[in-house]
Image (tube, rainbow, N blue to C red):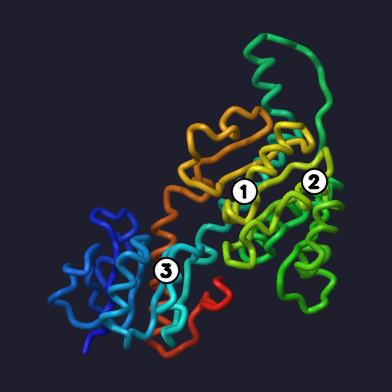
Amino acid sequence: MALTVWILARPGDPGLGPLDPAPPGVRFVVGCRIEDFAAAVAPEAVFDCGVGRSLLEPVLAAHPEVRWIHSRFAGLDSLLFPALRDSPVLLTNGKGAFSRSLGEFVLAGLLYFAKDFPRMRRNQGAGDWTVFDVEELHGRTLGIVGYGDIGRAIAERARPFGMRIVGLRRRTNGEGGDGLADEIWPLSRLHELMATADDVAVALPLTPDTRHLLGEAEIRALKPTAVFANVGRGAVVDEPHLVRALEERRIKGAVLDVFETEPLPKESPLWALDNVLLSPHTADHTKTWLLDASALFLRNLERFRAGQPLANVVDKRAGY
């Protein structure tokens, strides 16, 4: 008997290509409304392709016996609802599918400020041959708040530039480093990291514990020469305090792919600040990003059918 997997996806979803045809012995049923599944065989697994809680919640209510749910994306803050959190269903996510590009974006942002690319472009447009000094990333300490998959991808790309890497994460084994990070600190040393790092990259998931974790005190601790990058979730930063620090030139600049409200409101001061490099949450939108996410799901599907441990199992209580 075929394994039935419900695919929660909007019409024309460009990431579904790798799922056609389905693997032998698997039946995919695709829909974006609960009515689309009315005549379908009950699912053993569900693949949420970004439709999210509005459909997943009624699906789980109708079929609490489902054994496995996979989320296309790594962030789960908008997906985890009480019934899912409390259920025995195994939840996995797309962690790792987008990390390379996010790591590249952080390094691009650090280089943007170190080499003063904005000044180069202004001078080029004005035909201005004024010689000026630039900085090196070599020898600078990069603090990575949220040293998980994305954090390690950032470290992997910063390491060849000769940066010293200090990772920060909730769970540590007391190790000095891991071959990428020179040191790994517990989250309790957040303020110390903010004060001692030359640059800071944030790659935290959004959970009740991390919301506004980087507040006024942490932002004030940054060095005036620091570049602050965020590719995790916007709401882990108290955004008004970050804006104020940028407006007052208390830090060198910010590299931002995520924001507390998205799309970023037109009235946000961030649009007009010349010390901000701003991306509309597209730092991981490569040409193959959704295809890569589906390929990751298919690899996990093979494990599921073989009774093997799944990759990227989420701690639903922790939220990541």
Residue 298 on image: x %, y %: 39, 72
- Tag 1 near tag 3, CB within 8 Å: no
Is 231 located above or below residue 67 in the figure? above
247 vs 30, left or right, is right
Q: Secondary structure at mark 1?
A: helix
Residue 258: assigned label: none
Query: Rounded to the nearest whole Å, what is the CA distance between mark 3 and mark 2?
Result: 36 Å
| Residue tagged 2 | 220
For badge 1, the amino acid type reads: Glu
For badge 2, the amino acid type reads: Arg
Query: Rounded to the nearest whole Å, what is the CA distance between mark 2 and mark 1?
Result: 27 Å
| Residue tagged 3 | 71
Quadrant, the C terminus? bottom right
Residue 28 on image: x %, y %: 24, 73
Q: Secondary structure at mark 2?
A: helix
Is 265 located above or below residue 174 in the figure? above
Q: Secondary structure at mark 3?
A: strand
Residue 61 on image: x %, y %: 30, 79
Quadrant, the N terminus? bottom left
Residue at 33% in and 61% down: 51
| Residue tagged 1 | 104
